[in-house]
Image (cartoon, rainbow, N blue to C red):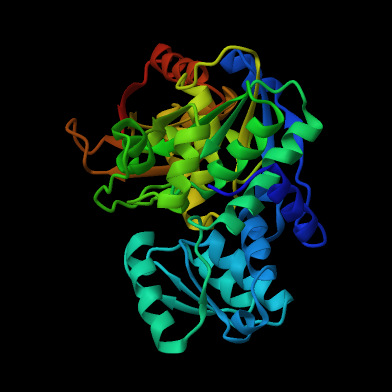
């Protein structure tokens, strides 16, 4: 390991004209729910929508003129792709990016818009990484690794410096971890400034390769699985990053796919922040009591906000149903004029929003004089939903919850 705080301070100077100093703010809501004083470091507000531009730019600006002339190539699930494309174009360098076929189209299109040639291959990062090495041999470009590179690590470490500059009495930083570049840089920077600070990594439980490696004391490769946190779905941590992780990271915890989705939902609803899956794992871990540290001041890193809008829509719909804030039920009514209108008015009068209503005639077991009506409604809380159901029952309606 050759990096120290001075390397990160130099990286900070290198990227000063390009990368934003992103917001760090206190969350009253998350603090109340978790019992900690929770601060959010919002790298989803960074240029290209994620922290990756820091490491990518620092790496590319440090290339020799001969390396720059050959152009650069990278493999990425999306955010490193955009960081490399942006940095290369800004410095007048050609870039080629290999991305998984499963990468969100928002990330693919953004990478192309920043000036890169995009090749899509494989299901997870490790597969497109192997493809990128093949392409590199063909075109002779300089490879920009997304995490296993000390210039990249130093660039990501500038986040740790920013946090400590703004919040000196922070007790712990909770960081998403995939291949380990981000947490290596932040941990090195933070512990160099404040040795007693705790650094906690968070990974998806279905592909927790860095956690397994830390526990085994050696690099472990897991089967490739695509998590909702696609940006940190990495089968094998880097050999360079693993040394920093072993020295500076205190613990790595995991979160489930449902917990990640809940984190995305909470960041949007309560903090008005759009986060991708990887960006939500830190707050997911805190909200689900996965983090246990002494002290009160915790910074959760929201590492990126590049999420496909269609995926975001699915998450919102699903969470509303899980939280019982969107419910479906079937009501039996008499099939006569005005009956359906009266039922709809009853539902609306209780403060529910009717999303969908469909009357099925001729299918009630009692015969042609009765009909079944399917309702889908949105309510404020689980208790509100139960009040609606109870009130309809008191009014004599026969109903059944479905879905």
Rendered location of residue 276, percent (x, y): 53, 48
Rendered location of residue 261, percent (x, y): 45, 39
Does any portion of residue 378 appear in the rendered image? Answer: no
Rendered location of residue 331, percent (x, y): 34, 29
Residue 159 against residue 17 in the figure, above or below: above
In this rendered view, identify the residue nearer to me: 173 or 8.
8
User: Which quarter of the figure has residue 319?
Assistant: top left
User: Which quarter of the figure has residue 272?
Assistant: top right
Residue 10 against residue 323 in the figure, above or below: below
Task: Identify the image quadrant of the C terminus.
Answer: top left
Q: Is residue 204 left or right of residue 32?
A: left
Q: Residue at x 75, y 53 (%)?
A: 10
Does any portion of residue 166 appear in the rendered image? Answer: yes
Rendered location of residue 139, percent (x, y): 46, 88
Q: Residue at x 74, y 20 (%)?
A: 169
Q: Is residue 236 left or right of residue 169?
A: left
In this rendered view, identify the residue nearer to me: 335 or 258.
258
Q: Is residue 176 left or right of residue 333?
A: right
Residue 99 against residue 297 in the figure, above or below: below
In this rendered view, identify the residue nearer to me: 311 or 56.
56
User: Which quarter of the figure has residue 243?
Assistant: top left
Q: Residue at x 63, y 80 (%)?
A: 68
Q: Residue at x 71, y 31 (%)?
A: 193
Q: Is residue 362 left or right of residue 228?
A: left
In this rendered view, identify the residue nearer to me: 187 or 283.
187
């Amino acid at each position: 390991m050759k990096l120290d705080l001075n390397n990160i301070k130099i990286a900070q100077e290198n990227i000063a004209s390009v990368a934003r100093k992103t917001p760090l703010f206190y969350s009253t809501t998350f603090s109340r729910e978790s019992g900690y004083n929770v601060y959010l470091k919002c790298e989803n507000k960074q240029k290209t929508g994620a922290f990756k531009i820091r490491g990518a730019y620092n790496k590319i600006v440090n290339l020799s003129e001969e390396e720059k002339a050959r152009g650069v190539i990278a493999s990425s699930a999306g955010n490193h792709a955009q960081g490399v494309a942006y940095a290369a174009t800004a410095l007048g360098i050609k870039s080629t990016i290999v991305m998984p076929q499963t990468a969100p189209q928002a990330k693919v299109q953004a990478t192309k818009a920043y000036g890169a040639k995009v090749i899509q291959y494989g299901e997870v990062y490790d597969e497109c990484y192997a493809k990128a090495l093949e392409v590199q041999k063909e075109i002779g470009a300089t490879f920009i690794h997304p995490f296993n590179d000390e210039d990249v690590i130093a660039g990501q470490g500038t986040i740790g410096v920013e946090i400590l500059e703004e919040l000196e009495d922070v007790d712990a930083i909770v960081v998403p971890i995939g291949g380990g570049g981000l947490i290596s840089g932040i941990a090195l920077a933070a512990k160099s400034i404040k040795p007693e600070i705790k650094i906690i990594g968070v990974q998806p439980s279905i592909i927790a390769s860095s956690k397994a490696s830390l526990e085994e004391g050696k690099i472990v490769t897991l089967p490739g699985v695509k998590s909702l946190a696609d940006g940190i779905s990495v089968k094998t941590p880097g050999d360079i990053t693993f040394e920093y992780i072993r020295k500076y990271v205190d613990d790595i915890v995991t979160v489930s796919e449902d917990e990640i989705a809940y984190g995305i939902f909470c960041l949007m609803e309560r903090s008005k922040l759009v986060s991708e899956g990887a960006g939500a794992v830190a707050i997911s871990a805190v909200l689900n009591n996965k983090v246990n540290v002494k002290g009160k001041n915790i910074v959760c890193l929201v590492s990126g906000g590049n999420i496909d809008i269609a995926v975001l829509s699915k998450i919102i719909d699903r969470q509303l149903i899980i939280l019982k804030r969107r419910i479906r039920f079937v009501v039996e009514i008499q099939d006569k004029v005005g009956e359906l209108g009266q039922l709809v008015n009853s539902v609306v009068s209780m403060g529910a929003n009717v999303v969908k209503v469909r009357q099925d005639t001729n299918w009630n077991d009692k015969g042609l004089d009765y009909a079944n009506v399917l309702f889908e409604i949105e309510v404020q809380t689980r208790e509100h939903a139960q009040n609606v159901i109870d009130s309809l029952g008191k009014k004599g309606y026969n109903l059944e919850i479905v879905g």
